[in-house]
Image: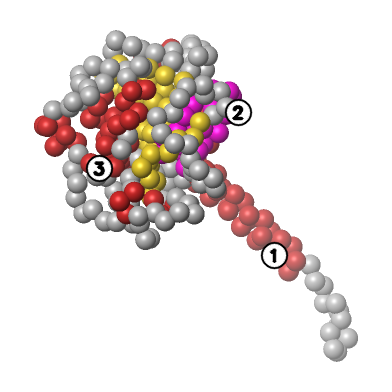
Amino acid sequence: MATFFGEVLSVYSRAVEEDEEEVDENEEDAEIRRELEEKREVHLHWSPEVSESLKSGNKLPCSDFILAVGHNAARFLSVYALSSENWDALGRASVWNERSGGFASEESTCVFYRPKDNPAVLICQVTCYLAEDQLFQWTEKVFDCLQLRQLNVTVLSESSVSEFKTADYLSSSSAPFLRSLHSAAFSGKPVCKSLEQPNIVTGLQAAVLNHCEVHRIPSIVYQCYSDVIGPDSVTMETFKPTLTKLGKSIKLDPSPSADILRKIVRTTNIQSNLYI
């Protein structure tokens, strides 16, 4: 490079040094992304017996997989099924993301249960938040542990009524209400109306339904639309029509005691989200 005075200067380091800095920054960013991906990985923790069986190449025998997504759906199963001592905790899935409390937090786990007298039934309660990049991973890992032959999947989930799209006026007295959406392989009769277009399901229930559709697994999602933020007894009771279907797979208590209801169902800080 020539200067104004004709002096020739050798230029050799600036571009090279900038390239090296960019490479170093890119490598650092890539390392951070790898560490974040590893931290956000979904981990399944099974009982020793199940772990040994899975390591041997076996799959969990499962004719019915019942998944409860959300506090009200999970409490519904706790009241009408898991309140008895006829269940074993089979394992859990631990999840970390920006909205979870960490791996040790109760809110960051999804617990699996199996009835002692019917090992072909599996229940999972999911009350934690799963990020979009974790939904497919959770679904793939869980279903990879199950025998898919003759498997039936039932999902109980919940959503805000403000997300429900309808051309008709929706009064506050209409909520909560139940809607269903099922895979093409499902041949049963839903206990409620089908989800009207253009409504869709999202989250883990959508990931599970999509997985079942691809793999031709009979599955149905029962989505409860509620005008209350958080867990409450009225929203939980909306799932009661599904008892007629779930009762064919597991033993249910149609009339739980008042003590069980008081212990599990607590209605506090009710807030309507109808106009949110």
Marking on residue 177:
none
Residue that protrudes farthest toward the bottom in the picture: 5
**Cα gap from disc 3 to disc 2, whole angstroms:** 35 Å
- Residue at point 43%, 42% (across, down): 130
The amino acid marked with disc number 2 is Val
Q: Choose top left, top right, bottom left or bottom right for residue 6.
A: bottom right
Instruction: Pinpoint residue 27: horizontal percent, then vertical percent.
Output: 62, 51
The crowd level at tag 1 (other Cα within 10 Å; few <14, some 14-19, many 20+) is few
Residue 33 drawn above or below residue 251? below
Is 212 contained in the magenta span? yes
Q: In the depicted view, which residue is nearer to us: 210 or 88?
A: 210
> In which quadrant is the N terminus drawn?
bottom right
**Cα gap from disc 1 to disc 3, whole angstroms:** 63 Å
Please name the residue that numbered disc 1 is placed on.
Answer: 18
Instruction: Pinpoint residue 7: horizontal percent, then vertical percent.
Output: 85, 83
**Can residue 276 be seen from the camera position used here?**
yes
The amino acid marked with disc number 3 is Val
Q: Nearer the viewer, mark 1 or mark 3?
A: 3
Is 265 contained in the magenta span? no
**Callout 1: SS:** helix
Please name the residue that numbered disc 3 is placed on.
Answer: 234
- Residue at point 42%, 46% (across, down): 97
Residue 79 drawn above or below residue 7? above
**Callout 3: SS:** helix
Marking on residue 214:
2
Q: Choose top left, top right, bottom left or bottom right for residue 106.
A: top left
